Amino acid sequence: MTDASKRPYQEVAAQLVERIAQDGFKPGDKFPTERQISKEMGIGRSLVREAFIMLEIEGYLDVRKGSGSYVRDRQPGRSGLTGGDYGPFELLQARQLLESSIAGFAATTVTKGDILSLRETLELEKRSIETGEDDYSADRQFHLQIAEATQNSVLVNQIDTLWHLRESSPMWDRLHSRIFDIGYRSQWLDDHAAVLEALRRRDAEGARQAMWQHLENVRLTLLDLSDVEDPEFDGFLYSKTVSG
């Protein structure tokens, strides 16, 4: 029976903790891979990734780049799962559902001034990428400006809240600590340009689809680039970066 007070990834994490105990895993033993767990439990990799990140934060697993996950010897006095954070892919799903609808609506209300402001923000984002700055404020600003173009303060507040949750999330920090390849930032810029073009044309369905695809690209890229179980994973060779 599931606990309605727990988020899906917390339910999965709790089941994996039980498995560690019941199957007799000892400190240093290699734990089944995310792919194995996903197949055995019949759930998506993103949900398993969130559960593994939680177990890593809580001290149950030691996740090693290019190798996999190993059972840890937990510190005395620590018991149970205490994480109450939103999962990064859960947040992305919420953003995808909400922001795609907002972009579609914004296409019907956007003004010339909004378009000019969005173009300026894309230029800021482009310069940040070209100079290699570790600054993603233009990314956040672009998404907020689209919400502002709806002229609806409730929608603006919703987007601001989702970004705040992301920026204050330990699970997001842990996920991004695995990501080193910065090439995807140019893809985000192209995605943003596609959204802006649909807004400029006042194409509601085009704007909705462009935003949906952008956040789907974000999800798939984060899932791929943070896969430390991939034997080809060599993120440790690069400089760390963060995006979203």
Image (tube, grey):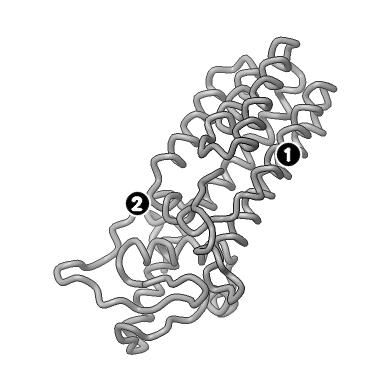
Q: Are marks 2 and 1 in contact (CB under 8 Å)?
A: no
Question: On the image, numbered disc 1 is attached to which residue?
Answer: 191
Position in image of residue 45 (x %, y %): 58, 66
**55 up-or-down from 69: above or below:** above
Residue at 24% in and 73% down = 74
Q: Identify the residue at the far left of this view.
A: 77
Depth order, front residue of 93/190: 190
Element assignment for label 2: loop
Write the residue at 35% across / 81% down.
Answer: 20
The residues tagged by marks 2 and 1 sit, at their Cα atoms, a distance apart of 32 Å
Left or right of 108, for residue 234: left
Which is nearer the N-term, disc 2 or disc 1?
2
Callout 2: 10 Å neighbours few (<14), some, many (20+)? few
Q: Residue furthest bottom?
A: 24
Residue at screen point 64% across, 55% down:
221
Residue 95: image quadrant is: top right
The residue labelled by disc 2 is 84
- Name the quadrant containing residue 196: top right
Which sits in the foreground, 241 or 107? 241
Local crowd at mark 1 within 10 Å, few (<14), some, or many (≥20)? Answer: some
Picture quadrant of residue 101: top right
Amino acid type for the residue under numbered disc 1: Asp
In the rendering, which numbered label is found on residue 27? Answer: none
Q: Quadrant of the C terminus?
A: top right
Specify the amino acid type for callout 2: Gly
Q: Position of residue 52 (x, y in %)?
A: 44, 67
Q: Position of residue 209 (x, y in %)?
A: 77, 39
> Callout 1: helix, strand or loop?
helix
Quadrant location of the N terminus in the rendered image = bottom left
Q: Is residue 125 left or right of residue 52?
A: right
Q: Residue at x 57, y 26 (%)?
A: 141
